[in-house]
Image (cartoon, helix red, strand yellow):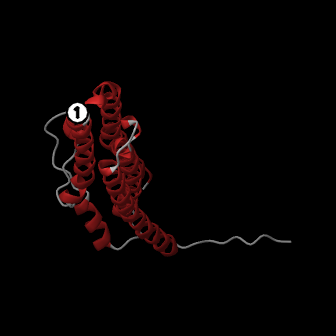
Amino acid sequence: METETIIRSDKEFIGDLRQELMSTQSARLKLTLQKLIFITGLLAVGGTMPSPKPEMNPLLLAPLVAIIFDLFIEGENFGIRRIGIFLKLISAVPKTESIWETVLNMRRPNKTKLGKYFPKYLHRDIFAHWANPIATLTVYTITIIYILHNRADLKIFAYWYIPIIIILILFWLYSKAIIMRNRLDRIDSALKNSL
């Protein structure tokens, strides 16, 4: 029995890639909504629930859940940006689409070493870029206020809880700023070299 070789055209591949882009954007939106639902639930239940063991309050899980969701959301952002880099550089897409992706991915020139890791995209939605970090830091702040001001019996608990959450936030910022940026730069370089 002969095996049939299926050869896809560039047009079919680009169509599939656009479909992947839309499904990735949809997954990112779904994760963002799930984050808001979970966090709101944890804050509401934890803020109103009397607990015989304050360290078991669901409110204390809110920052951890927020950071986990943020990592998943950043993973979807990575997929979206990776596709955008490809569409920007590949010649099989219409010129207007390539220009659009180029404009979206324009970065302000780096003036400091940290500028490489925290680039300012000139034409992306800056509010969406900062929405998740602000939401996560708000949840973290609410939780710390709860621990330190409302529950005297949780102050000892705060000595290990606060450093763990700070470490998680630093890891999240590191993965967002350095790991993702370096990988996107490597993808950009690899595509430029192979085309």
Residue 15 horizontal/vertical position (percent):
47, 74
Identify the secondary structure beneath mark 1. helix
Q: Residue furthest right?
A: 1
Q: How many numbered circles are shown?
A: 1
Q: Nearer the viewer, residue 40 or 21?
A: 40
| Left-right relation of 19 to 188 | right
How would you rate the neighbour count of disc 1 (Cα within 10 Å): few for under 14, some for 14-19, many for 20 or more? some
Residue 81 horizontal/vertical position (percent):
35, 57
| Left-right relation of 148 to 184 | left
Image quadrant where residue 146 sits: top left
Looking at the rendered structure, the kind of residue marked 1 is Leu
Q: Nearer the viewer, residue 94 or 23?
A: 23
Residue drawn at x 32%, y 56% is 40
User: What residue sits right under mark 1 in the picture?
Assistant: 148
Relative vertical location of residue 116 with respect to residue 192 in this rendering, above or below: above
Residue 153 horizontal/vertical position (percent):
30, 29
Residue drawn at x 38%, y 71% is 93
